[in-house]
Amino acid sequence: MSDALTPPEITAALIGLGEKKAKQAYHITFFKSWMSAWILCFGAMLVQVIQGGSGTLRTDYPGLITLVAAFFFPVGLIMLVLTGQDLCTANFMVVPMAWMKGRVRLWEIPVNWIFVFFGNLAGALTFVAFLAHWSGLYTSGMITYSIAVAVNKSNQGWGECFLRGIGCNFLVCMAVLLGTGAREMVSKIAALHFPVFVFVILGFEHVIVNMFYIPIGMLNGANVGVGQYIGRSMIPSLLGNIVGGLLLGIPMLCFYHPPELPFFNRFSSGRTEPATGSTIVRHEDGAETPPSIYGTEADTTSAGRKVGKGSS
């Protein structure tokens, strides 16, 4: 018997996670978002240490060096997810899932995304200034590499950046989904690691990671303006990341926990059965509690009853 959560249980857990993030106090959301980007930047800077410090190896064996750098990049995402911080790219998936189940209001989606996005931006820029630029850790090779990365990322075609953003966040959200399904630490780390490793290898665009790569390149002398960065990188990668998160979250919801929306129910058969393998708690007021991310069952309370396969 597998120790991992089933897809319906994972989906229920993500719905609950989206509700929790949307209902969280705004100041807590902002500072958890600040911390999230700060942590993520450790992995991004590690990539530049490996790439910029590899010398002729990077020109002679670019695929090998990229493989090594990509292998270590996920350390930041692993740390931020396991410590419960807020990254906007994950919220692009889980908060709409909670809305489609009627757990949050529509206006709470953009409000949450705005607080998390600007918290992430503040955390990334703080890391860039204090731990990357002013720390004096950047060697000449790292400076040259960071400039090249900033110029390249700010001169892509708008459509190319948008499409790369879709691929990126589909994989990042897949990492979050798989990590949610794992129930012990080693499995969670492995589940989070490999999808992120793949997105780095493939060269996709992550809007928050670019909040490190492009500003540090600009501080190191890249001929990139703020307007160019926002218009040619930040906006298209942001929109692509939103689409990528929805492309995973919405199908998972429709497969395992059909959304409670009029336009969806109009085409349903009228039967409402819990998804196979899911375990949720349905309370007397109609609210549902998903299973724990760290277990297969939710804690029941005196006001609720457990609903599983075959119950109504």
Image (spheres, helix red, strand yellow):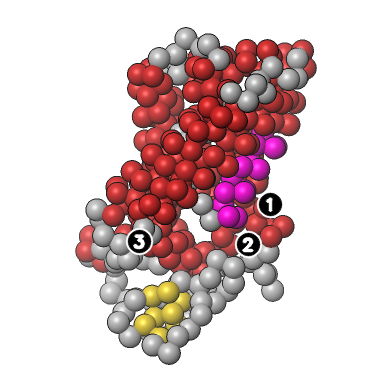
Decide which of 120, 267 is in the foreground and name it.
120
At which x and y percent is residue 233? 42, 25
At which x and y percent is residue 211? 48, 30
Residue in view at x 39 percent, y 35 percent: 238
Which residue in the protein does label 1 denote? 190
| Circle 3 crowding by C-alpha within 10 Å: few under 14, some 14–19, many from 20 | some
Image quadrant where one finds the N terminus: bottom right
Name the mark on residue 23: 3
At label 3, the amino acid type is Lys
Question: In the rendered structure, are the residues bearing label 2 and label 1 in contact, judged by CB atoms less than 8 Å apart?
Answer: yes
Decide which of 207, 46 is in the foreground and name it.
46
Question: In the rendered structure, which disc, 2 or 1, sits on the residue that comes first in sequence?
Answer: 2
Q: Is residue 67 magenta?
A: no
Which residue in the protein does label 2 denote? 182
Give how far apart the Cα atoms at labels 2 and 3 are: 25 Å
| Circle 2 crowding by C-alpha within 10 Å: few under 14, some 14–19, many from 20 | many
